[in-house]
Image (cartoon, grey):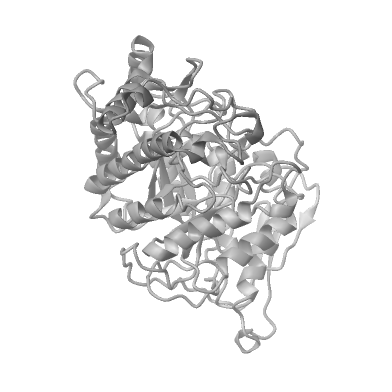
Amino acid sequence: MEGALLGQRAGVLKPELFMTRNVGFVESRRMGSRTGRVRFDPATGGWRKGALKVALKGVRSEMAVQEKELNNRRKSTGPVRLFVGLPLDAVSDCNAVNHAKAIAAGLRALKLLGAHGVELPVWWGVAATGDWSAYLALAGMVRDAGLRLRVSLNLHASRRPAFPLPDWVSRLADANPDLLFTDRSGRRHSDCLSLAVDELPVFDGKTPLQAFEEFFLSFRSAFSDFIGSTITDISVSLGPNGELRYPSFPPSTGSHRFTGVGEFQCYDKYMLADLKRHAEEARNPLWGLSGPHDAPEYNQSPDSSNFIRDNGGSWEGSYGNFFLSWYSGQLLSHGDRMLSTASKVFGDLPVTLSAKVPLLHWWHDTQSRPAQLTAGFYNTYGRDGYDAIGEMFARNSWAMIIPGMDLLDKEQPHGLRSSPESLLSQIMKACEKHGVMVSGENSSLVGIGAEGFRRVKETLSAENSSVDSFTYHRMGAYFFSPEHWPLFTEFVRSMAQSEIDSDDLPSNEEEKLSLSADMVPENNREMQAV
């Protein structure tokens, strides 16, 4: 990344910057009715010698700082705030700042462009010891750049880059593998803990919820000087990849590579004990012996399994309703417990609290919608599985992060019966119904293209939109490359211009951003992984 920003001049990109006082995303997070348009605040800050240079001619920039109102159950009136995700390995697994010079240059570029702030991924496995020094150093860099910070508290593990769970958690899971989600074949998912142990004293007399609360308290204490000023947003991981879902994909894959129907994850002993108890309460004890015997395997299609078959599948019968209601209800209760626990620690702070719900759009255009069923969303045709999710977020006064706002139906692989646009609309309608504020994300940096940016702009600019912020993933070498940077700057510029009236334009004033960038090899994209 440093070479891309600071190396020899392989080419100069000069996207036109914004020539009015409405140039970046403003800080306001006030709720109320929304005009449906996106406004921008000026890019501010001076510039020293380097690869990025800006000529500011007569334009004085001000940041519109408005009073923060934290009632997330009402719609946002303020302009959408733009964040850019920092690399997932901005802090290494050894608790050291990675890519420091490149990140500093990137922060300056984003400030000039008018971004509101950046998102910092914080890994439980790195900071569980209470050593926050590397993360504090990055927060200081963001503050010095004049940007705001959204912090993502990741309670899950990551395979690429490699960030395991805390050592002491991994040791306990090695001794008791049922602490981890388990599929029908007995394979364990080491990325996160089974939701069935949330309130069980499996950590040497302590529950996972208590361990999470201690981690939150440690973060709050360490970052007290930043919270409410530099740190304006805190998100909390609710499951694999930070999302509210079961790890229904094969253990070795991620959501961006998997398009199968998935498998139910209810085979650790704690989940099975709860299923047995639930079946006995329903006076059908045989239903509690296991998950569905005719359930699909990970990579099967809907019609290859009787349980999720569109026509006449057993998901439509009384047993199917029993199991899916229990399975989805467990996920909903887990989400509620997590939001409640985090609210005890962060609820009185002047920040926006948020958590992520996945956009499992493949096989959405079927009756059973199996990829959502195995992930814990009872959202079959004619049944709204996201209404209860929206109500849960509203009850806790949290914003909902929804990824995939760049995805188009027409660009999905043929044969998957995928519809990201209709699923996104359904989830956002649930948020609108319950007054839940929305924070959007793109699905992937690589390959977003002009059409993807157009789709994002369309969603953010919609009438009565409840979108308060948008986080673009993720900073790295490719982000600043000649292939991508002009598209991103044009996206920001076009959104600024959508709010500009011709009378607002100053005369004889122009701002230019010049970016020197080496051509980045196609395989040098690890920092952009979502």
Where is residue 513 shown, x and y percent of the image?
68, 62
- Between 125 and 332, the residue placed more toward the observer is 332
User: Residue 529 occupies which quadrant of the picture?
Assistant: top right
Where is residue 16 shown, x and y percent of the image?
71, 68
| Image-based side of 136 in relation to 374, left or right | left
- Between 2 and 359, the residue placed more toward the observer is 359
User: Residue 272 occupies which quadrant of the picture?
Assistant: top left
| Image-based side of 374 in relation to 253, left or right | left
- The N terminus, quarter of image: top right
Residue drawn at x 50%, y 22% is 293
> Does 462 appear above or below 354?
below
Where is residue 430 shown, x and y percent of the image?
44, 59
Residue drawn at x 50%, y 78% is 35
- The C terminus, quarter of image: top right
Query: Which residue appears farthest toward the left when viewing the image?
Result: 205
User: Would residue 107 be visible to someone looking at this image?
Assistant: yes
Residue drawn at x 42%, y 76% is 33
Where is residue 151 shown, x and y percent of the image?
41, 46
Query: Which residue appears farthest toward the right when viewing the image?
Result: 10
Looking at the rendered structure, the number of numbered marks drawn on it comes to: 0
Residue drawn at x 45%, y 71% is 63
> Does 350 appear above or below 519?
below
| Image-based side of 199 in relation to 469, left or right | left
- Between 278 and 5, the residue placed more toward the observer is 278
- Between 61 and 522, the residue placed more toward the observer is 522
| Image-based side of 315 in relation to 6, left or right | left
Query: Which residue appears farthest toward the bottom when viewing the image?
Result: 503
User: Would residue 259 be visible to someone looking at this image?
Assistant: no
